[in-house]
Amino acid sequence: MIVQSADPAIREKLACICRQFRIPGELILYRRIPNGHINTAYYTALYDGREVRQYLVQEVNWYVFREPVSMMRNIDLITKHIMAKEKTMERRRRLHFHHTAEGNNYLILEENGEREFWRLYNYIENSVSFETADGREDVLRVSGKAFGKFLRQLQDFDASQLVESIPHFHDTRYRLEAFSRVVEEDALGRAKDAAAEIGVILENRGFGCSLCEQIDRGELPIRVTHNDTKTNNILFDRDTLDPLVIIDLDTCMPGLACYDFGDTVRFAACTAEEDEPDPEKMKLDLRLFRAYAEGYLGELRGVLTPAEIESLATGAAVITLELASRFLGDYLIGDKYFRIDYPEHNLVRARAQLALFEDMMRHMDDMRRIVRALA
Ligand code: GN1
Ligand code: MG
């Protein structure tokens, strides 16, 4: 058997992790999966002399997820709840985390005095995910259906069972306050590179807090939401585009429907990638927006309240502003949270998100009109 041996230490570690999760056979292939800014994932294949079995092995970022054991418990409860509704045994439609001999769906490794948190789950064959929708309305429509259905399936899930895996995750008011503090401290002297961008974020603080104010007034219901609804968190059947499974359940927590709706719009109903270096190229695409809204609202008739429906377009702009503040805040403190590929990456991401935010604000009425016509 040929083993890909770019880094023997990683190979050895992955083989050891597979053994601890009681996967039979020998590791014959692995490769790093590049998507995601937080956790680190590997595709692995093992062969036991009869069968090749494929898995995803993932290291959870302990800096970002402070309580990964509770987070794995959340995921277990949520996947069980969804499976009970799906009534399908098809392996390609379920996220199945394997257990160690101790019965844990995670493994803690000690490496040079540092603790690492690993998990292992089934690889979904013949599936595809989208880093951008590439102008494809069908991808957006199906994504809307998938995330709409996800929200519907979790309607009767008891949220009090969940631990907040990242406190204040989409608490935009808290995020913007944290951002202001980071700007004031300017620990690395980087704020001067981003004076205009900082200005835009701070000027829009009032708008950014508007959904939090609606929560305070009791106008928007808190539901169990996904909170990271990028199109690369859905695995689609490669041939039929059927959405097989929603992945990355790490941030499933109580939240607002409009943040879930808005985050897909931010990521995929636009004209460029999240880190497009030329902000001029980053615009909202109303045709894709409509396709997404069609899919999403179609799954949620009779579920969303009138105030929630009105909040969907606002959610798109607020989550985009929030993420711009998170990217820029991370740039100002020295890139501790989001993985970067080059030194200014977080600044570039923030600029692209702000360009999109400003375009969304220009088209707010159009977005609202489209949603109202479909609801
Ligand atoms: C992070 O790791 P990934 O790519 O799934 C982040 C999201 C951001 C997203 C931006 C736990 O998600 O909140 O919207 O990057 N996840 C966490 O691409 O912070
Ligand atoms: Mg993700």
Image (spheres, helix red, strand yellow):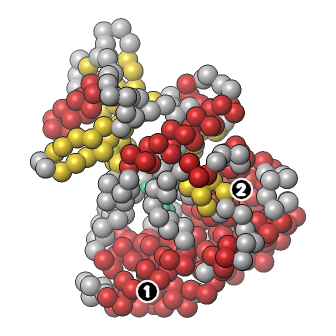
The dot on residue 112 is: none
Q: Are marks 2 and 1 in contact (CB under 8 Å)?
A: no
Q: Position of residue 367 (x, y in %)?
A: 76, 70
- At a point 18% along the width and 51% down the height, the residue shown is 114
Q: CA distance from mark 2 to mark 1?
A: 33 Å
Q: Position of residue 134 (x, y in %)?
A: 59, 54
| Mark 2 closeness class: few <14, some 14–19, many ≥20 residues within 10 Å | many
- At a point 67% along the width and 73% down the height, the residue shown is 215
For the N terminus, the quadrant is top left
**Looking at the image, can residue 62 be seen?**
yes
Q: Which residue is mark 1?
A: 180
Q: Give the label, 2 or 1, closer to the camera.
A: 1
Judged from the image, the secondary structure of the residue bearing numbered disc 1 is helix
Q: Is residue 275 left or right of residue 77?
A: left
Q: Which residue is mark 2?
A: 292
Q: Is residue 72 above or below residue 53?
A: below
| Nearest to the observer: residue 288 or residue 180 | 180
Q: Is residue 206 above or below residue 306?
A: below
Amino acid type at mark 2: Tyr
